[in-house]
Amino acid sequence: MDEQTFWELVDRTGPDPADFERLADELSDHGATDIRDFADHLAHALHALDTPAHYRAVATSGASFLRVRCAAVAAGNRAYEKVRSTPATLACYIGAPGAQLLPVAERAYRTSTRADWKHQTAVSTRTGANDDAWGTSWLRPHMGTTTGEAHAPQDFMIALRHVALTLDADPSWRSWWMQSGLTACELGIVAEGKLDHLRPSADIRRCNDRLRANFTCALPNSDADLSSRAAAEVRSMFEVIRQAMSLPGLPPTPPVPSLPADVPAVAVTTKPLPQLPAELEQQGYLTLTQIQEFFG
């Protein structure tokens, strides 16, 4: 199946949920290769909209970035091309149907072949997978956690990364960072279990044209607002960076939307806390050397 045929199929699909069922039925009349091609074309279309500018267009809405991108594709080729060239127009598709496109190929394949769907698309649709687009980002978060008694909840790691992506997409924060004269900030965040947070570990070093800044942060309470807690943690880290680099005051933190229910998991580096001498066991925090080496 070529790209033109893919768009011809999508263009015949309307906003009604039954239209997506009909699309799956129509696609099931094709062979297995065509169905896999359909999935690849869809993934490429979604991948192309995975850019900081498109992310910024919907970041404050609380909507799922993937769902909104799906809605733009479901609107048809002409609408899609407009969104692709003018990222701000992606906001027009917040709340519009389109996520039903994602399972279409799998349903069609099962109907057509009576076999399980095992195809992996050529590119990923997750947020941040478009390296060509996100490679220009100035803020690159790396998430980590120790593997002691308490593990950092995935939701908290997602919230911390989401705050970082929000700052990266914000024009005022980008302008603020440009004053550093460096191309990027590699921000490593390690959430620990037992932690004396009066003495958290931080490592800030210049590596050629980048800043590498690794921080520890405590786990959130069970009743904590994760987005607010994450925003406060990340801002406090940048205040330390600001002082270390003698930069101007931080811009206001932009609104951080609630996490959507379907947000993908975040890759997290996990390492155990090393054995400590008995007199240091109660401290429970990573040393400067350990935080330096956490992400390799």
Image (cartoon, rainbow, N blue to C red):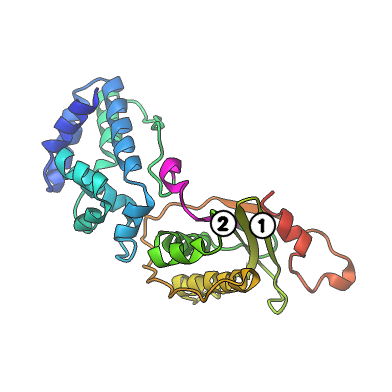
- Is residue 272 visible in the rendered image? The answer is no
Q: Indicate which disc, 1 or 2, sits on the residue closer to the N terminus.
A: 2
Q: Where's residue 129, x and y in %?
A: 44, 44
**Which dot marks residue 225?**
none
> Left or right: 96 with respect to 215?
left
In which quadrant of the rendered image does the N terminus lie? Answer: top left
Mark yes or no: residue 117 visible. yes
Which stretch appears magenta? 129-143
Residue 82 at x, y percent in the picture: 19, 45
- Going by the numbered disc 2, the residue's amino acid type is Leu
Image quadrant where residue 193 sits = bottom right
Which quadrant holds residue 23? top left
Residue at image x 88%, y 69%?
278
Q: Name the residue under label 2.
A: 182
Residue under the image location 34 percent in, 54 percent down? 53
In this figure, what is the number of numbered marks?
2
Q: Please name whichever residue, 283 or 199, is drawn nearer the observer in this view of the structure.
A: 199
Q: What residue type is labelled 1?
A: Arg
In reply to whether residue 132 is colored magenta, the answer given is: yes
Query: In screen coordinates, is 220 left or right of 285?
Result: left
Q: In this view, does 208 lie to the left or right of 51?
A: right
* Secondary structure at numbered mark 1: strand
Residue topped by disc 1: 206
* Residue occupying image coordinates x 27% and y 26%: 35
168 in magenta: no
Asked if the residue at tag 2 contacts the one at tag 1, i.e. Cβ–Cβ closer than 8 Å, the answer is yes
Residue 82, placed above or below residue 30 = below
Secondary structure type for disc 2 = loop
Residue 80: percent from left, percent from top: 21, 43
Q: How crowded is mark 1: few (under 14 residues within 10 Å), some or many (20 or more)?
A: few
Q: How far apart are marks 1 and 2 (CA)?
A: 9 Å
| Residue at (48% x, 67% y) in the render | 176
